[in-house]
Amino acid sequence: MPITMSYPGYPPYQQTSPTVVSANPFNPREDAEVLRKAMKGFGTDEKAIINVLARRTNMQRLEIAVQFKTLYGKDLISDLKSELTGNFENLVVAMMTPLPQFYAKELHDAISGLGTDETVLIDVLCTLSNAEIRCITAAYHKTYYQNLESDLKGDTGGHFKRLMVSLCSAGRDESMMTNPQTAAADAQALLRAGELRFGTDESTFNMILCQRNHAQLRLVFSEYQRLTGHDIEKAIKNEFSGDIEDGFLAVVRSIKNQAAYFAKALNKSMKGLGTNDRDLIRLVVTRSEIDMGEIKREYAAKYGESLADAIKGDCSGDYKKCLLALIGES
């Protein structure tokens, strides 16, 4: 049975197959002392840092940071940043950041400056619950003194903007109650809004995909398949393009199988020339305490190699070792 877990200031979430679980016994003072010793003097003991931080939950890491400041009058994140470099530093800082604040920073960075990183917006807003989105919105306002919805409106356009605003409003029905008649009507409405007309009525897709609960949407998808003989994903690919296509597909795929969605996102971060380390770090850090076990199974089934082997082939050094520890493969 899934259990619920909560971060400071963050709503409980369903935890299905985490690879990072609460250390028990846990002594934050001892951990703080180990970290201090690892960074004191000449050189840094990266192995000791990984052994402590990759085997503690985000909540426990925050407790260690409090003890570190109490014992030594120093900020743990600042000390870690001064000792570490590159992607290993970025990964450890992400691990040490309270989850809502981390998500808020990812979203802020995605819409700041020139251009927009739509992948981040989609991965976060298309997959999280109402309570999680509300908590991230509050953290965003507290950190940046800006309204997330307003910033999204200012940085996105067209139908993709409407999708982002709908999801950001965190108003999805989450009752999980189902009604086959309503599902049949919604499937018909999607068909009339897309494949049965010249041009596409995007607002119908937006309304149904952003408002109905997950169990109800699975019924809608099944009914759509029965009516047309093909998957709703095929219809979205035929009717839409660009960011709005990616957004609608993310909503559908994460509702069908969230672990498979994140396995695909991890593969995308590593395939081809170069690695999108920002996406890789975000995905590993945020899913390791929730469903990384399931994601690993989906990854191996879909891509014919383990997630660990993919990371080993794409990353190196302490960065690689820490990622492997977070996915339970060290």
Image (spheres, rainbow, N blue to C red):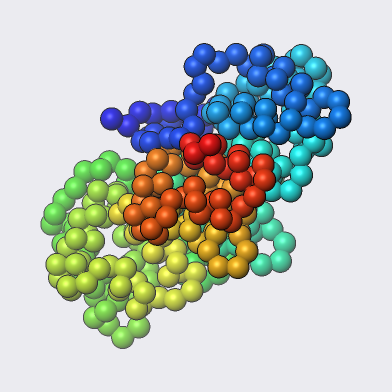
* Above-or-below relation of 225 to 79: below
**Residue at figure coordinates x 36%, y 74% from the top left:** 237
Q: Nearer the viewer, residue 200 or 17?
A: 17
**Residue at figure coordinates x 22%, y 72% from the top left:** 230
* Residue 1, horizontal then vertical, whole percent: 28, 30
Tell me how many marks there are: 0
* Residue 184, horizontal then vertical, whole percent: 16, 62
Please say whether residue 140 is visible from this viewpoint: no
- Name the quadrant containing residue 183: bottom left
Q: On the rendered structure, is 140 left or right of 185?
A: right
* Above-or-below relation of 216 to 117: above
* Residue 250, horizontal then vertical, whole percent: 41, 60
Q: On the rendered structure, is 154 left or right of 170?
A: right
- Name the quadrant containing residue 194: bottom left
Q: Nearer the viewer, residue 27 or 219?
A: 27
Please say whether residue 72 is visible from this viewpoint: yes
Q: On the rendered structure, is 285 left or right of 255?
A: right
**Residue at figure coordinates x 23%, y 61% from the top left:** 221
**Residue at figure coordinates x 61%, y 52% from the top left:** 315
Q: Residue furthest right?
A: 42
Q: Nearer the viewer, residue 300 or 97?
A: 300
* Above-or-below relation of 315 to 274: above
* Residue 83, horizontal then vertical, whole percent: 80, 36
* Above-or-below relation of 289 to 180: above
